Amino acid sequence: MAVPLGVLDRLSLDVAALHATDSALHLGALILFEGEPPPRARVLDHLGPRVGLLPELAHRLADEAGRPRWEPDPGFDPDHHLYELPGGADPLTVAAELLRQPLPRDRPLWGIWLVRRAGGGRWGLCYRAHHAFQDGAAAVATLERLLGPEGAPRPRALAFRPPRPVRWAAVLPEFRPPRRVTWWPALDTPPAQSYAAAFADVDTARLYALGRLTGATVPQLCLALTAGALRAWHPDGWGPDGPGHGRGLRANLGIGVRDPEDPHPLLGNRVAVAGVDLPCGEPDPALRLARLGSALDHTRLARLADAHRVVLRGLPYRIGRLALARSIDARYTPLGVADLRIRQPLGFAGTPAAGVYALPVMVPGQPLFVAWLTHRRRLHVTFLADRALAGAERLPEAWESTLAAYEQGAADGAFAALARAGAAVGAS
């Protein structure tokens, strides 16, 4: 059965066309395993039956008379979606190679790469899909079915929450365009439109312990650590006398707007964005965290999801195209962030995954995307940067140093007032 493309699907294809290579609008994850890689046939034997339980994966892109749609591929074969790479000496080399891999348009827009070597005696599997074909939540749910425990339930609803009536008076200010950014050094160099990844890893126990001392959630902490890392990356830019004059950076955070009754929960892009101001210019870590706590307030994000769901339901494609230019303009929103969670433990043939790293999309002109993904008891952070961005390889170290500084500050009681405020909100 054919499924019409949603407006976000079509806009994602438009964004992809702005890139030098279509692969910049692919998303997914690299999953690493210890030991020797299996033969291709063994991977196919594992994936084939599971792919058969996910009918959305058999849909390809079609367009007749200007009516784009997803339609079942009559020649669909999982074997056509399994690719191989020799790999490299480390995960960063592997990620750089994966980011360049195409997804042929004559078949459903997803693929799995068997990576023979990923450094340190490891091999990998990488799932990637076009952002028009799937959003991040759908890609995560697909991974859980393909590499999670056998018999895991099929996802029925990937919505942020069931829709509720929109309180427009509270939401309309959120739709105002952000102010222009002119002070971030990362925007000074024309983008190369080729990308490199850097990774950071942390035990989630550290974040939970820090959350108890600060009253913050893990996503709030991750945003605060990202703001701190960006501040440390360009330390001369954020003071009152610097080019930023104490201001911050606007980031786009994805929020799900999929209808809970969607009969194809793994097909199409159903993610809008919430603007988040990263307070890089605030020198006080406690105040940075407090501001981000408000930005990631559940009520605020839920209202935004409801509003975007209503707007997108009736948004004409031509109006969406007009709004697209500002929404992806790096001069107003220079980076993206994503919070992803894998709730089913991933593995292959009895071997548990040793690491799972997000490979997010890159918006044209935006120099940086930061995505964190939790799996089992680890949080894996991906910094995906345009290659023209000088010094981006230092971001993982800056992120980890910021985490250590927050832990020291929490031990010294610097966040006590925040923790009390958070406890009071939770009790009310």
Image (tube, rainbow, N blue to C red):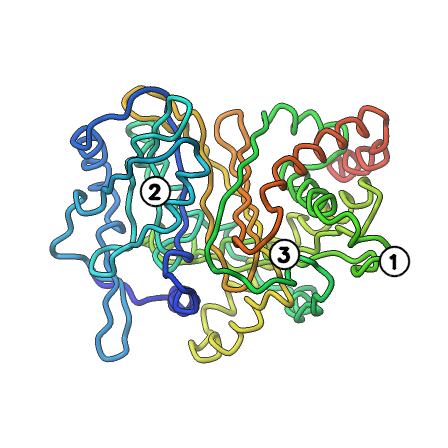
**Residue 210 x %, y %:** 71, 28
- Looking at the image, can residue 403 be seen? yes
Q: For numbered disc 2, what is the local secondary structure?
A: strand
143, above or below 314, in the image: above
Residue at 65% in and 25% down = 206
Q: For numbered disc 1, what is the local secondary structure?
A: loop
The amino acid type of the residue labelled 1 equals Asp
The amino acid type of the residue labelled 3 equals Ala
Q: Looking at the image, is mark 3 or mark 2 earlier in the sequence? A: 2
Name the side, left or right, on which 391 lies relative to 140.
right
Q: Nearer the viewer, residue 288 or 227?
A: 227
Residue at 32% in and 54% down = 263
Q: Nearer the viewer, residue 383 or 157?
A: 383
**Residue labelled with disc 2:** 127
**Residue labelled with disc 1:** 241
Task: From the image, state whether disc 1 or disc 2 is nearer to you.
Answer: 1
Q: Which mark is residue 251?
A: 3
